[in-house]
Image (cartoon, rainbow, N blue to C red):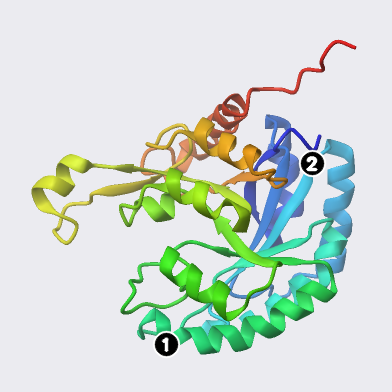
Amino acid sequence: MSNLLRIGTLVGGGDAVRVIPQIVGHGFESFSLTFWQTTGSVDLKETAARVRELADKHNFVISTLGIFGNPLTGAGDNADTLASWERLIDHAHLFGTDIVSGFTGRLTDRPIDESIPAYAEVFGELGRRAADKGVRIAFENCDMGGTWATGDWNIAHNPTAWEMMFNAIPSDNIGLQWEPCHQMVSLIDPIPQLRKWVSKVFHVHGKDATIAWDIVKEYGIHGPKEFVWHRTPGFGDTNWSDIITILRQAGYQGTIDIEGWHDPVYRGELEMTGQVHALNYLKNCRGGSIIPNPV
């Protein structure tokens, strides 16, 4: 199934054993397990064993483990974020994945360039730990409401920051967890960006955006009117056939996992309706099912 480019979804790591059996029958081929700020009281060995049993039964893979917090400051609820990175790196092999993803962290409310030394120190060490275990680190490209000048959580949301990050730690096992949505909210065209940066893309989130250019042109981006919405794939502006073509041309071996829970329409009681539509839409964009050639 290596040529298939599996399509899956995100599931909370502490909830995986409960949720996956309820939704895997819809045709999800992979699951990305995520944690917010801490792995908490989750027994990773036990969870891995139970998830692997489900994977064997239903023929899916665990694509990534994710920890989303601020490991650079460790402030407040981020006190366990750095230790959680270490934990997930150490346990990734038990889940059958070689990717741990998340935010870089950031020096709160300081410009991005001021965070680079702390980033290099923390992830230089985490990168070596990961390399020793055959694990890759992938940074999500979400701004979390931040800009170049100020913010929290993450610096990996701008291509200039990526250049600085990858120059600071020039390691083959450090790259991106990319999606078009987080670039489109900054009015960046994701297609040429992916073509340029695809060699550093280890994992893809299935999330799109709709940009209301009429609002941008009349009111700008600093007015009271919303000008962009996160969308579940199939409802946004991006040509996912182009994305999959670029990924395949570059020899991408990862998955696309839908990041739901953001769409302004397909949410609440329509959440899984939207996600399953996105699943089938993305499968169609990759060419549908793999059909064997005649021998």
Q: Quarter of the image containing the N terminus?
A: top right
Provide residue 40's location: percent of width, then percent of height: 69, 75
* Residue type highlighted by circle 2: Phe
Specify which label sits upstream in the sequence, 2 or 1: 2
* Secondary structure of the residue carrying numbered label 1: helix
Q: CA distance from mark 2 to mark 1?
A: 41 Å
* Secondary structure of the residue carrying numbered label 2: loop
Q: Nearer the viewer, residue 211 or 251?
A: 251
Whether residue 162 is visible to the viewer of this picture, yes or no, is yes
Residue depicted at 54% across the width and 89% down the height: 118
Residue depicted at 49% across the width and 61% down the height: 141
Residue 199 is drawn in which quadrant? bottom right
Residue topped by disc 2: 60
Say left or right for 66 vs 114. right
Which disc number belongs to residue 114?
Answer: 1
Crowd around label 2: few <14 · some 14–19 · many ≥20 (10 Å):
many
Provide residue 236's location: percent of width, then percent of height: 39, 37
Residue 14 is drawn in which quadrant? bottom right
Residue furthest top as drawn: 294
Crowd around label 1: few <14 · some 14–19 · many ≥20 (10 Å):
few
* Residue type highlighted by circle 1: Glu
Say left or right for 79 vs 143. right
